[in-house]
């Protein structure tokens, strides 16, 4: 399974936005973006004005890297979103939000999407009682996600249970911290998805 293995703090600096890829570290003074928010590389103060194409590409990269999706996979998501009824940009974000690793993150099992991806790939979760280790698995309304009974005693999930109690859980999912479980109540509406993304720029990028 291909994945990004370089320093993730460089991603936030490059996109000019804190994407919270390091969990709790992003909320402390150790956050690289807080200490140095300029883009990585030499001569960052002399960069030229970004073109319209550049803005579209950067927005696409911002969304793609936030959800830890590779380029070809992201394009496949866009093509599927374009075939659905409704606004393509919102459909795209909705499909990304419904990925199993993101649902695990939204429910509060993990402190970041990369951590959620790792927990899923290690086979710690079941969907409707079936063990699932595919981070890109598309959940549906009514699906129940829970930690496998044989894994619940592990420290990471004891910490996760406490985090779930205080996590800001969006309205389209529900959680049961005591049972280390949660359910998908509905598909997320646009105001329940990240407001820092401009999905229209992504649509324009692929429509050029």
Image (cartoon, grey):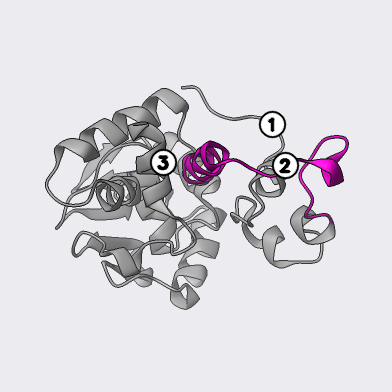
Q: Secondary structure at mark 3?
A: helix
Q: Measured from the top left, where is residue 84 in percent x and y? A: 14, 42
Outermost residue toward the bottom in this view: 166
Picture coordinates of residue 36, whole percent (x, y): 83, 54
Q: Quadrant of residue 47?
A: top right
- Marks 3/1: CA distance? 20 Å
Asked whether, in this view, residue 189 is left or right of residue 160, the answer is left
Q: Quadrant of residue 137?
A: top left
* Residue at the image position 59 percent from the left and 30 percent from the top: 4
Q: Is 32 inside the magenta-drawn segment? A: no
The secondary element bearing badge 2 is classed as: helix
Dot 3, how many residues are within 10 Å of its Cα: few (below 14), some (14-19), or many (20+)? Answer: many
**Marks 1 & 2, CB-CB < 8 Å contact:** yes
Nearer the observer, 207 or 115: 207
Whole-angstrom CA distance, mark 1 to mark 2, is 8 Å
Q: Which residue is painted at 55% across and 58% down in the image?
A: 111
Could you tell which of marks 3 and 2 lies nearer the N-terminus? 2
Q: Nearer the viewer, mark 3 or mark 1?
A: 1
Q: Give the numbered dot on residue 6.
A: 1
Instruction: Count up the numbered dots.
Output: 3
Q: Looking at the picture, how far across and down is residue 104, in whole percent?
A: 39, 53
Quadrant location of the C terminus in the rendered image: top left
Residue 39 is marked as none
**SS under mark 1:** loop
Which of 131/192 is in front?
192
On the question of residue 124 being in view, the answer is no
The residues colored magenta run 36-65
Residue where numbered disc 2 is placed: 10
Q: Which residue is mark 3?
A: 120
């Amino acid at each position: 399974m291909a994945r990004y293995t370089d320093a993730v703090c460089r991603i936030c600096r490059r996109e000019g936005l804190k994407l919270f890829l390091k969990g709790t570290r992003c909320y402390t003074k150790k956050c690289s973006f807080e200490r140095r928010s300029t883009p990585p590389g030499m001569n960052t103060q002399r960069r030229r004005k970004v073109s319209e194409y550049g803005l579209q590409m950067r927005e696409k990269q911002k969304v793609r890297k936030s959800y830890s999706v590779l380029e070809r996979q992201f394009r496949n998501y866009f093509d599927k979103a374009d075939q659905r009824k409704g606004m393509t940009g919102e459909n795209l974000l909705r499909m990304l939000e419904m990925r199993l690793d993101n649902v695990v993150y939204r429910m509060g099992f993990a402190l970041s999407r990369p951590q959620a991806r790792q927990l899923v790939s290690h086979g710690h979760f079941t969907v409707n009682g079936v063990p699932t280790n595919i981070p890109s698995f598309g959940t549906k309304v009514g699906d129940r996600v829970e930690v496998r009974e044989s894994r619940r005693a592990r420290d990471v999930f004891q910490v996760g249970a406490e985090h779930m109690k205080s996590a800001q859980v969006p309205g389209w999912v529900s959680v049961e911290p005591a049972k280390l479980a949660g359910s998908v109540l509905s598909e997320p509406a646009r105001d329940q998805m990240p407001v820092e993304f401009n999905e229209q720029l992504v649509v324009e990028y692929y429509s050029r």
